[in-house]
Amino acid sequence: MKYIMTDNPKEQDIIEIRDNLIKYNLSHIELKHVKPIVIIVNDENANKIGGISATTHGNWLEISFLWVDEKLRGQKIGLKLLQDVEEEAIKRGCKYSFLDTFSFQARDFYIKSGYKEVLTLDEYPLTSKRHYFVKQLIVAK
């Protein structure tokens, strides 16, 4: 065996590692369908001013990115994006949502939106914290 370490990997190497891990993981998971959700907000000139990117997998929504242009924050654009992606996830059968954020980003926003913090990594990368959240989208009756 030959081990090769690099700080300048080829994109194809990363894709191959990811794809092989996904293939292995899916062989052990009962629900194999992962489906993306992307919602984009454009201004009147068709410029992107916000958006959210997520995937649904079984009964989980995983939010990857939520962004609103800094000049437009505080106008509930992010809240609408979050609510819309959660609503679509519920239509797809999701019961839970998962996301993470940095301490300088939107921790309080997610708490106000019903997310519960389940893990915090301190000193990430050095002076920040990384917060992990979950939310129950459908309450059991």
Image (cartoon, rainbow, N blue to C red):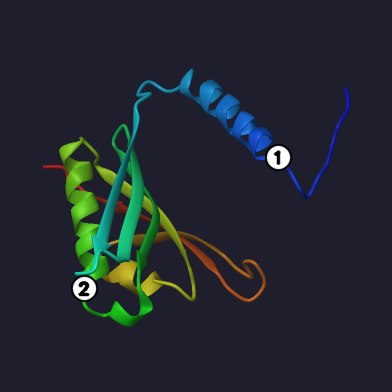
Q: Are marks 2 and 1 in contact (CB under 8 Å)?
A: no
Q: Quadrant of residue 83?
A: bottom left
**From this viewpoint, which residue is outermost toward the top?**
27
Q: In the rendered view of the protein, which quadrant contains the N terminus?
A: top right
The reply, left or right, for residue 65 in relation to residue 128 is left
Q: Residue at x 44, y 72 (%)?
A: 105
Residue sitting nearer the eye, 35 or 13? 13
Residue ID at (71%, 39%): 10
Q: Toward which corner of the image does residue 16 lie, by quadrant?
A: top right
Residue named by callout 2: 76
**In the displayed image of the protein, which residue is found farthest to the right?**
2
Residue drawn where x is 30% and y is 54% of the image: 135
Residue 56 shows up from this direction: yes
Q: Which mark is residue 10?
A: 1
Q: Which kind of residue does numbered mark 1 sit on? A: Lys
Q: Amino acid at mark 2?
A: Lys
Camera-side residue of 21 and 9 = 9
Image quadrant for the C terminus? top left
Q: Residues within 10 Å of mark 1 (few under 14, many from 20)?
A: few
From the top left corner, tell me how far across and down residue 39 is, in percent. 26, 53
Compared to residue 112, the image places residue 3 above or below, namely above
Q: Nearer the viewer, residue 29 or 88?
A: 88
| Pointer 2 or 1: first along the chain | 1
Callout 1 secondary element: loop
Residue furthest left as drawn = 141
Q: Which of 35 and 111 lies nearest the eye of the viewer? A: 35
